Amino acid sequence: MRQIVLDTETTGLEVEQQHRIIEIGCVEISNRRLTGRAFHRYLNPERDIDEGALEVHGLTREQLAKEPKFAEIHQEFLEFVRDAELIIHNAPFDVAFLNAELARLADGAPRIDEICRVLDTLALARRRHPGQRNGLDALCKRYSVDNSHRDYHGALLDARLLAEVYLAMTGGQATLVLSAETDTVHGGGARLPESHRPLDGVRIAVIAASEEEMAAHEHVLALLDKASSGKTVWRTL
C-alpha cells in the first residue's frame, strides 16, 4: 500500500476566516517502509499571518513573499498524493485547508478526499491511548521517536516525525490481552477452533517468507526494539 504522511502550516487556525496554507510537507511510505520520496513547498499566502501561528512555525509573510502560490504547485502536489492513503495528525484541520485551497482554483480541481483515502492518526491515538495526551510531541515521547530538534513546527519535519510515530504505533500489539475463554495461560495448551484444525489426510502447504517480507518483518522488530528502549525479549532468546 502506498501511503503519504502529510502536514501543513497555515496563517491561522480558522479556514472560515480565509486563512491559507503556507507550507506543505509529505513523505512517502510503501509497504511500511519510508521510500525517501518527499514533497515539500513553502507557499506565498497573499495575506498576513496571525501572531499565534507565527509563534508556532516562525514563518513571516516577508519570508514567503517570493515563494510560489498554491495555484502554481497544485498539479505537482496532486500528482504526488493521488490514489494514496494520506496519514495526517488531526486530519480534519489539514483536509479542510487543502480543500479550501483547491476550491479557489479556476480549473475545477477535485477535493483532496475525493482522490485519496485519509487516516487520522489523532483519532487512532485516542482509541489506543484514551485519556492520555496524544499530540505529536507526546506520541514521540511515548514511542521513543527523537524530536529534540523540533524548535518550531515545520510541515516536512512534522511529517517525518509522524511517519516514525505511525509505523511504531501500528507495528504490533503493545500489550497482549488474553480472553478468559482461552486456556493458553492456565490450561497447558490452546486448542484451535474446529474450523482451524487440519483435516486427516490433508497436506498443508508451507509458504516461506520472501526476502522482502523478511526485511519488512525485521524493520517492524527494529521499531519495537526502539519503542521499548531495547527491552524486547525475543532478541535475547
Image (spheres, rainbow, N blue to C red):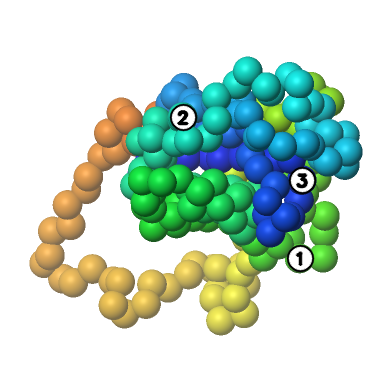
Residue toward you, 83 or 76? 76
Quadrant where the N terminus sits is: top left
- Badge nearest the viewer, 3 or 1: 3
**Number of numbered discs present?**
3
| Lower sequence index among marks 2 and 1 | 2
Residue matched to label 1: 130
Residue 188 appears left or right of 233? left
Q: Which mark is residue 20?
A: none
| Residue 24 seen by the camera | yes
Q: Residue at x 79, y 37 (%)?
A: 49
Distance from disc 3 to disc 1, alpha carbons, whole Å, reads 28 Å
Residue toward you, 6 or 139? 6
Residue 81, x across and y down, in percent: 41, 40
Establish if 210 lies above or below 166.
above
The image quarter containing residue 55 is: top right
Distance from disc 3 to disc 2, alpha carbons, whole Å, reads 21 Å
- Badge nearest the viewer, 3 or 2: 2
Residue matched to label 3: 12
Q: Amino acid at mark 1?
A: Pro
